[in-house]
Structure formats: C-alpha cells, structure tokens
C-alpha cells in the first residue's frame, strides 16, 4: 500500500484490528487546541469502514472528540506505519458485562494512508505486557473486546 491512500481498511489492516492491538490516537485537545496523543489497545474493526475503540469514561479523549470529532489512529503493522483518519463519535457506554466504566467510540474512516518514511520498513512491531494480575487482565480484555463487538 506504499504511497497509496484508501478510503477504507485493506484486508490486511482489517485483520489486524480483529484482536487487541497497540495503536495511538491523535485528537485535538478541547482546552488548548493542541495535539493530544493517547495509546490504546482496546480496538476492533467493525467492518472495513469503521473502527470501534474503548476508553475510560472519564478520559479527556471524550471531550476532545465531542468538541472536534476529526482524529487519527496510528498503527504499526505489516512492516509499515498507517494513519487512519476520520470522524469519531461517542457511540455508547459499556454494559454491566464490563466491570469498569468505558465509553465506546466509533471512528468512521475517511482515509487510510501509509505514512512510513521512504526506503524503510518496520522489522519489529510494538509489543506490550500488562503490568497487573495476568488472569485479571485476560478476563478484562476479553470482556471489553466482546463489548466492542456489540457496537
């Protein structure tokens, strides 16, 4: 996909969003008007044109999106880095099936762009480990991912 711009996820990128992934979300800060970047892992592709993600219901991301819904997700996958931009909206709240309060956000994709710098490829994708009880983390992750699939 190098140097191409799409209006939806490619099949390969769609597959990347079917399980928990490290992504970064860029929004416009509601107070300062500057850029705000947050790391997320609870993301899910509803289809090739829609990504659903969850954030704490108290997160400043919510106010940022309510004031300025244009935002971008960045993902490192398939040897490259992609910027996925569009309009976001708070689509709902988590149900009682999830033990923490989450806001569910829907990103309607307008543009998918390969933003890797010329002449390079990613050879190791980001990896992360949960720093709290492993079983509790697995349970929560499963509950949140199931919640995302409902939206």
Image (cartoon, grey):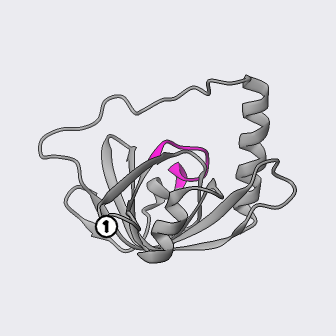
Is label 1 in a helix, a strand or a loop?
loop
Question: Does residue 8 show up magenta in the picture?
Answer: no
Left or right: 124 as drawn, with respect to 104: left
**Image quadrant assignment for residue 102:** bottom right
Q: Residue 106 at x, y = what percent?
A: 57, 70
Q: Residues within 10 Å of mark 1 (few under 14, many from 20)?
A: few
Residue beneath the point at 19% across and 60% down: 3
Most distant residue in the right direction: 96
Residue in front for this viewpoint, 48 or 95: 95
Left or right: 137 as drawn, with respect to 53: right
Most distant residue in the left direction: 118
Residue in front for this viewpoint, 51 or 36: 36
Quadrant for the N terminus, please. bottom left
Left or right: 63 as drawn, with respect to 34: right
Quadrant for the C terminus, please. bottom right
Question: Overall secondary structure of the magenta stretch?
Answer: loop
Residue beneath the point at 51% across and 68% down: 63
Q: Residue 99 at x, y = what percent?
A: 82, 47
Residue in front for this viewpoint, 100 or 123: 100
When the figure is inspected, residue 124 is found, relative to residue 74, above or below; the finding is above
Q: Residue 101 at x, y = what percent?
A: 74, 55
Q: Residue 25 at x, y = what percent?
A: 43, 55
Left or right: 65 as drawn, with respect to 77: right
When the figure is inspected, residue 109 is found, relative to residue 40, above or below; the finding is below
Residue in front for this viewpoint, 13 or 95: 95
Q: How many marks?
A: 1
Residue beneath the point at 72% across and 32% down: 137
* Residue on which the image places disc 1: 33
Region rendered in magenta:
15-23
């Amino acid at each position: 996909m190098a140097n191409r711009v799409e209006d939806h996820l490619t099949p390969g990128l769609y597959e990347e969003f079917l399980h928990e992934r490290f992504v970064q979300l860029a929004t416009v800060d509601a107070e300062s008007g500057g850029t705000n970047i947050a790391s997320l892992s609870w993301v899910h592709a509803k289809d090739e044109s829609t990504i659903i993600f969850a954030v704490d219901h108290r997160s400043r991301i919510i106010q940022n999106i309510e004031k300025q819904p244009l935002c971008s997700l960045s993902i490192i996958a398939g040897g490259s880095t992609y910027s996925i931009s569009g309009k976001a909206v708070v689509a709902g709240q988590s149900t009682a099936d999830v033990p923490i309060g989450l806001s569910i956000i829907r990103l309607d994709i307008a543009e998918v762009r390969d933003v890797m710098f010329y002449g390079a490829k990613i050879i190791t994708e980001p990896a992360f480990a949960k720093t709290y009880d492993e079983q509790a983390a697995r349970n929560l992750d499963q509950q949140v991912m199931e919640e995302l699939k409902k939206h």
